[in-house]
Amino acid sequence: MRTVKRLALIAVGYALCVVAGLAAVTVNELRMPDDVAQGSPGMVAFGDMILFVLVTGFAGVVPTWPSTATGQPVTAVPLQWKA
């Protein structure tokens, strides 16, 4: 597989991770009672931020795993940098 195609697939994977994080926050907001959301909006915003970071981070393992599990770099390493 060409390097450009690999990088494009990884970029799409990370974009889907952000979408998953946004979806998790949206579901959390829809399930939250109005009195809780209106009573402490700062804590709700902080909780949404933490949820987004956690979901995006855990989902980010998926596009990262193939290159780290095999030990193969995404791009070709020049001969001068090989040990």
Image (cartoon, helix red, strand yellow):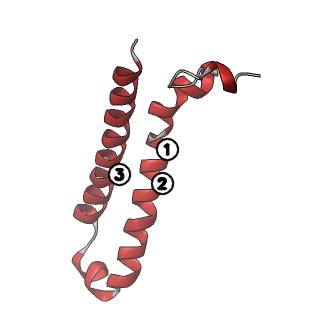
Tell me the residue that label 3 is attached to: 21
Instruction: Report the Cα–Cα distance between label 3 and label 1.
Output: 9 Å
Tell me the residue that label 2 is attached to: 54
**Residue 22 left/right relative to 10:** left
Tell me the residue that label 1 is attached to: 58
Q: Position of residue 39 (x, y in %)?
A: 31, 88
The kind of residue on which mark 1 rests is Phe
* Mark 1 residue element: helix
Q: Quadrant of the C terminus?
A: top right
Which residue lies at the image location 65% right of the left edge and 18% below the top edge?
79
Instruction: Report the Cα–Cα distance between label 1 and label 2.
Output: 6 Å
Q: Residue furthest top?
A: 1
Q: Residue furthest right?
A: 83
Determine whether 78 is above or below 26 in the image. Answer: above
Q: Position of residue 61 (x, y in %)?
A: 51, 37
* Mark 3 residue element: helix
Which residue lies at the image location 59% right of the left edge and 23% below the top edge?
77
The kind of residue on which mark 3 rests is Gly
The kind of residue on which mark 2 rests is Leu
